[in-house]
Image: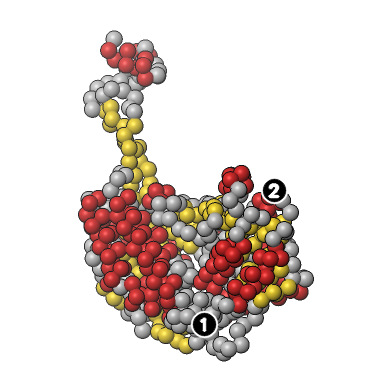
Amino acid sequence: MKTLWINHRSFQSGGKPIPVINPANEEIIDEVPDATRDDVFRAVAAAKTAFPTWWKEVAAHQKAELLHEIAHRFKVKTREIAKVMTLEGGKPFNENVDEIGWVVNCFDYYAELQRNARGRVIPSVESSQLAMVLKEPYGVVGCIIPWNYPILLLAWKVAPALAAGNTVVIKPAEQTPLSTLMLSSIFDCLPSGVVNIVTGRGETAGDALVRHPDVAMVAFTGSLETGKTIAKICAEMVKKCHLELGGKDPFVIAEDSDIEVVVRAVAWAAFLNAGQVCTSSERIYVHQSIAQEFVVKLADFTKGLVVGPGMNPDTDIGPMIGAENRRKVEAHVADAIKRGAKAIFGGKRPGHLKKGYFYEPTILTGVERSMRVMRDETFGPVCPIMTYKDFDEAIALANDTIYGLGAVLYTNDSKKIKKFFENVQAGTIWINDPLTDNDAGPFGGYKATGGHRELGEEGLEAFRQTKHVHWDFEQENKPWWYPYGNGNKPSGAIARKSKTKG
């Protein structure tokens, strides 16, 4: 059984083992501990000790060297980590190789960004004063990571948290802990206790981490319901929390779109990682004038996609993460078909794969906005298609969701583009290039998505708190101090200065 990695040492937990299952064949790969409350407390204690002792005061250039070293180690171990990610998560191997590449970029980006921004000097009230705004770390940050991009979404939290001067305790998802535990050999270049990893279930390890009084901030990516629970706990403790809670992203196709291009774009945006991406395009809106041609060509293209185990180099779409997740997708599709929708392609488990949590890429037409597949987050390889008459209707449909993570538009009409990005309620707007991330561009959403941001300068700012320093070089009595009976009265800065000199 794998051990916990705390304070640069491995510990055998007293918690019961959690089996890690390969979603491609439903076989147990390994077991990891379900960390006990004491395990979590030990990790937090290590991080708390390291914060003022080993990390908070590390100079910016030294932090940069260490973060660059972490990036380099990820690069060296790319294929080794990607293989484990494929076995425990199901995503095709080449997609996991790409994921590690994005992780490398993320650590390199924050290595340099943190060198440039400790705060700023602002105009002072008096000439004898200096006023500064300083950015400081929170302390211990609890990072709770989802299973769909277990290393990338870890990096989006850990890299800026470390760059800001915090120490961290990481709890990976119970479905994908093995690749995270592999990172012990990557993070051991850091001082003892700066990064700690505890495996376990949300209701045990996750709950203990969120509730620990020495955890100053919780960063979480996952479901809306779990996010609400975390937010409630943090609010009661007056603790900083940072949430990214998923989406139901629209993909709008204008009548001037290149059908051959947009077909491939939609397939990728809807079926990437078997549709298990928070920014998956889960609602497709196509102009009625091109809808028939688009649907026919999308179905033809989708038929050529290979569904299979992630380690097969020919696989385009791997398995879903688990049986419960697949049942949810099946329920959404069944509900849509029962209410009049039609499965143009897919809509079932592939017959040639007897084991594993596979589901065919599915194209639905005749859907309505009230169907579950258009309202709730499906998180599977399903592409529901609706038509629209005019662009105002398309924007209204795009905004018809409680979420607001991302939105895609395909057109070369500049007026439509401007109207779209000014009126669609989403944190990221992609024009003619879906789901592309940029380390310098903030990532996050509107409405029920959580309203917080990762990546970019905003990603660093999320892990820092603000302090105002007011420094007067002269120790002297101020004429506006008590007692007022001597003629001293509070007044503005100019009046104060004239009194002082008068």
Taking the image as shown, residue 269 lies to the left or right of residue 49, namely: right
Q: Which residue is mark 2?
A: 392
- What label does residue 275 carry, if any? none
The answer to whether one can see residue 472 in this image is yes
* Camera-nearest residue between 118 and 492: 118
Identify the residue at image location x=24%, y=59%.
66
* Camera-nearest residue between 120 and 356: 356
Identify the residue at image location x=28%, y=22%.
127
Q: Which residue is mark 1?
A: 308
Image location (x, y in percent) of residue 186: 28, 69
Identify the residue at image location x=53%, y=59%.
434
* Camera-nearest residue between 272 and 107: 272
Taking the image as shown, residue 435 lies to the left or right of residue 493, namely: right
**Vertical side of 343 occupied by 120: above or below:** above
**Amino acid, disc 2:** Asp
* Camera-nearest residue between 320 and 232: 320
Distance between the alpha carbons at the discs numbered 1 and 2: 40 Å
* Structural crowding at the residue carrying mark 2, measured as other residues with C-alpha within 10 Å and reported as few (<14), some (14–19) or many (≥20): some
Residue 322 location, quadrant: bottom right
Taking the image as shown, residue 475 lies to the left or right of residue 227, namely: left
Residue 8 location, quadrant: bottom left
Image location (x, y in percent) of residue 245: 53, 60
